Every structure is written in structure tokens, then in C-alpha cells.
Image (spheres, rainbow, N blue to C red):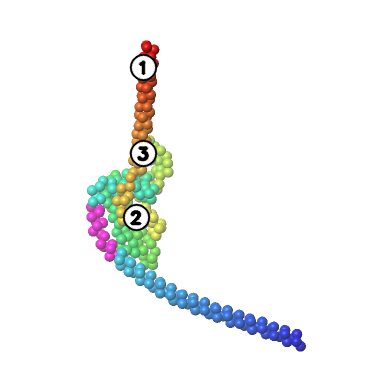
Amino acid sequence: MHTGGLACACELFRILHELSFQAAAGSMEKEQQEAIEHIDEVQNEIDRLNEQASEEILKVEQKYNKLRQPFFQKRSELIAKIPNFWVTTFVNHPQVSALLGEEDEEALHYLTRVEVTEFEDIKSGYRIDFYFEENPYFENKVLSKEFHLNESGDPSSKSTEIKWKSGKDLTKRSSQTQNKAGKKRQHEEPESFFTWFTDHSDAGADELGEVIKDDIWPNPLQYYLVPDMDDEEAEGEDDDDEEGLEDIDEEGDEDDGEEDEDDGDDGEDDEGEDD
């Protein structure tokens, strides 16, 4: 009887323990569920504030975009006084220069002005205009490319059709080019810069458009003023040559000094012999 009562007591204790554990687990699950619901409510408030902030930021951007326009216009007028400003700027930009072949650079020497225009609501897109003077490559005076976001938020782009002059279509050029010495060399040229105007495959990830709009256009002068690496190397070589000549002169002076000393010693020896 004693053994049986003890066993019953142990079983009862086990059952009570399990019920207590289940109750505690249920309580924890309820607390976690309530916490998750509260987190969701707080997150909705954060999202609402983020959306409100985006609207306020857009208004500020629109305001200052209008304020900047007269200064952009004044800057363009001043840039027009500097020959080859834009081709120099593009050549000095590391990402853009990688897209330029020799003939692209030649064509861009006729580029007189670049303008970036963000649409009034800004977030829907922008347009880049390239103004050219009369040139041997194409008939167009202006080449443009526009980037849009439609109502569903999908990006798209469109651009001016380039009216190439006979035999001057740089997008169909051969990889065989002429170097400055007039000798032919076979090498892989980058795809022509001008193919960008016909490439609408991925308007949402147009790297060149973004670089021009966000990096070059805000301050093109910083790239125009980048020193030419070839000139720097040439200056470095000239400095090395000058240092080499100075070393040679110094060595020559030392040798002359030694010869004079030798001559002096010989003279003293002769006098001693005469005595």
C-alpha cells in the first residue's frame, strides 16, 4: 500500500508539472504574439514617418533645384568660353574615359555644351542634352537621352536618333584604328560612347547616365582641372634628367678638383728636385 501510494503521488506530481509547463509555455507564446503585434504597429508608424519624410525631402529638392537653375545657366555661359572643356572633362573622368575610343574623343571635340534637366517632380526622371557644333560625324546639333519612371515605377529611356554622315557611324567602326603616327594597330577598342544613345536595355541601371547626372554635372570643373597624367609623367622624366645632369656636373667638378690637386703635387715635387 505504501509503495502504491508513493507511485500515485509521483504520477500526480508529474502530471501537475507538465500542466504547469504547458501553462507557462502558453503564457510565453501569448506574450510573444502580443509583442509581435505591438512591433508591427510601431513599424507601421515608422513607415508612415518615412513616407512623410520622403515627401518633405522631395519638396525641398524641388525648391532648391529651381534655385540652382540660374547658376547652372551662368556656369554654362562661362564654360562656353573654354575650348574643349567637356571633352577634357570626360577624358579625365575614370569611368567615362573607359568608354571612349580615339574617334569618340575626336567627335567630342565638337561638343560645346552639356545640360542635365531633372523633371519637375524629380523622381519621375531626367534628360541629358549634348550640344554640338558643325562636325564631320553627324548632322544633329543636339543629342538627348531621357530617363522616365512610368506610373507603375518601371524605368524606361528614349533618345535622339543620330543622323550619321556617310561612312562616319562610330557605332559600326572597325576595331582597326589609326594611331597618331599614322600606323595601323590592331587592338580591342571599347564600344563606342555613342552606342549609349541606342542602348535602352536596362534604363534602371544606366551607369553612364547616373555618372553624368550625379557626379559630373554637379561640379564638372573638378574633372576638367585633373592634371594630365601624361604631362605629369613627362615632367617627372624631365626632373629625373635634370637631376642626372646635375649629378654628372658634380662628378665632373670633383674630378677637376682632383686633377688640380695632382698638378699641384707634381709642381712641388719638381721644385724639390731642382733644389
Marker disc for residue 215? 2
Marker disc for residue 236? 3
Distance of mark 3 from mark 2, alpha carbons?
Answer: 30 Å
Q: What's the amino acid at mark 3?
A: Gly
**Which residue is at a point 42% across and 43% down the rendered structure image?**
188
Magenta-colored stretch includes residue 60: no
Marker disc for residue 267? 1
Above/below status of 55 relative to 213: below
Give the left or right position of residue 30, taking residue 7 as reference. left
**Which residue is at a point 31% across and 58% down the rendered structure image?**
127
Q: Nearer the viewer, mark 1 or mark 2?
A: 1
For marks 3 and 2, the one nearer the N-term is: 2
Q: Nearer the viewer, residue 165 or 62?
A: 62
Which secondary structure type mostly characterizes the magenta part of the structure? helix
Q: Residues within 10 Å of mark 1 (few under 14, many from 20)?
A: few
In the image, which residues are magenta? Answer: 62-77
Q: Nearer the viewer, mark 3 or mark 1?
A: 1
The C terminus - image quarter:
top left
Q: What's the amino acid at mark 2?
A: Asp
